[in-house]
Amino acid sequence: MHRLVNQAYVALACAVLSAPGLAQVQVEARNQMELGWMPGGWGSYQLLFENPDGESARVVGWSGAWMIGGVQWGDPFGGSLDVAVPAGGSARHDSIGYAPEELFAAAGDQVPQYAGHVTVRAGETEYEVSFAFDVPAAVLPEPVLRKEGEFIALELMESRFEENGSIENVVRLLDLCYQAMADLTGLVPYDGEKITFREAPPHPFWAYAGNPIILNSDYVGSTMDDFERGIVSFGWVHEMGHDFDVLGDWYCWNGPAAECQANFKLGYALETIDDPGMRIAWTFQAPDYPAPDTSVLLPGRELVERFFVRFGDAYLADPDRGWESMTSDDVHSMLMRVQRTYGWEPFKALYRTYGELAANGARPPESAEGKIALMCAILSREIGVNLVPLFERWRLPVDEEAVAEVAAAYGLE
């Protein structure tokens, strides 16, 4: 087991290449994960820039690599940056990195190091400033127990089982959500393998999707307390929704659209499961529709109605906002208004059509515009109405010609 060090790992860097009169930017790298990074997981760090000189500078790039005992492990990585560091001032860049399991296995008793440099531009000259910080392996402080349901499993620290009497109910409710998402999409992820919700050491996210779904230990206790009070975890069900986007390349045209799709499946589960235990707090509110009491517990359909359905009003009312500025909740609001008008069946057909196209060897559209036009074409066909005007009202990049072309290309006439 690697040692855990309860401090921020800091390394002051020095200029590798400089010249008289140039802004001499200094870099301090800080590991933000107090207990280290989970092997095979994500961690966060900060780069703090100080410019004591009288000339402004700009950080324009970075590179890094994992090091074990001063020797590089694995391939280097890097990219561009655009961070202004004013004369006599400072700036900060927050970033996230991934630490492979194999890194810690190779390190043995040694603590790996994340090392690299940033490229600073001062005037017409560039120079490099190095940085480094230690990254110990983070582990949970106690053993993990597993509780299996029909479709999902929980892997939590054993104290969670001792402190909470609702483990069985949590598994039951998550099983119901899985069944609902399978009903909506017509498929199951991971070839039907059970989805595991696994507690993990603290990381930069509340949780993230995959199999297993990686939970942040800092928030598992409060989430289990919510379940015991009858509140279903929005976040856990949301991450499961991501797992059901097996065909997401067909309809997730950008990041907000992908987040919308996870919540779309969450909304379907919460409002179609007939169970008195499916309640959720009114902590999510649409602009100009504030909750008078965020502790109120709502059935799933009421939360969807008061939050997702109403959310898009502010976007629609602002003609200066284009479709690329839509948040996930804006996209969701548009889709929910279609659903509230025409029901869930067109959306069940939508996902199944994507599956049929993929099974027949078709490839998804490459552009965001193509994916949006294809969704419009499929929904229009399934509902039996022309949805182009509605998509245009939401300022999405479609027109009659584009939708007709994509319908023809995919045999949807």
Image (spheres, rainbow, N blue to C red):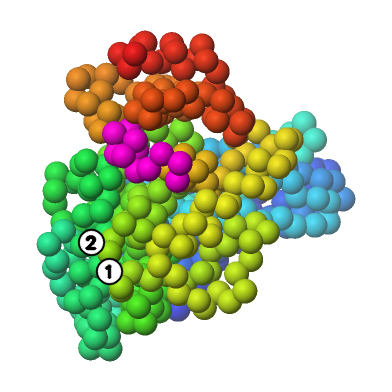
Question: Reading the chain from its start, which is encountered first: label 2 or label 1?
Answer: 2
Task: Kindly check if marks 2 and 1 are in contact, taking CB atoms under 8 A apart as contact.
Answer: yes
**Vertical comparison of 94 with 277: above or below:** above
Question: What's the residue type where badge 1 is placed?
Answer: Asp
Q: Which residue is drawn at 53% across and 64% down?
A: 284
- The local secondary structure at tag 1 comes to loop
Q: Is residue 341 magenta?
A: yes
Mark 2 vs mark 1: give the one in front.
1
Q: Position of residue 201 (x, y in %)?
A: 35, 70
Q: Where is residue 52 in the image (x, y as percent from the top left)?
A: 80, 57
Q: Name the residue under label 1.
A: 275
Query: Mark 2 packing: few (<14 Cα in 10 Å), some, or many (20+)?
Result: many
For the magenta stretch, what is the residue range? 340-351
**Vertical comparison of 398 with 154: above or below:** above
Q: In the image, is 252 to the left or to the right of 319?
A: left
The residue at the far bottom in this view is 163
Residue 196 appearing in the image: no
Q: Residue at x 55, y 18 (%)?
A: 399
CA separation in Å, label 2 and label 1 = 9 Å
Question: What's the residue type where badge 2 is placed?
Answer: Leu
Q: Name the residue under label 2.
A: 176
Q: Which residue is drawn at 20% across and 20% down?
A: 360
Q: Is residue 134 magenta?
A: no
Query: Mark 1 packing: few (<14 Cα in 10 Å), some, or many (20+)?
Result: few
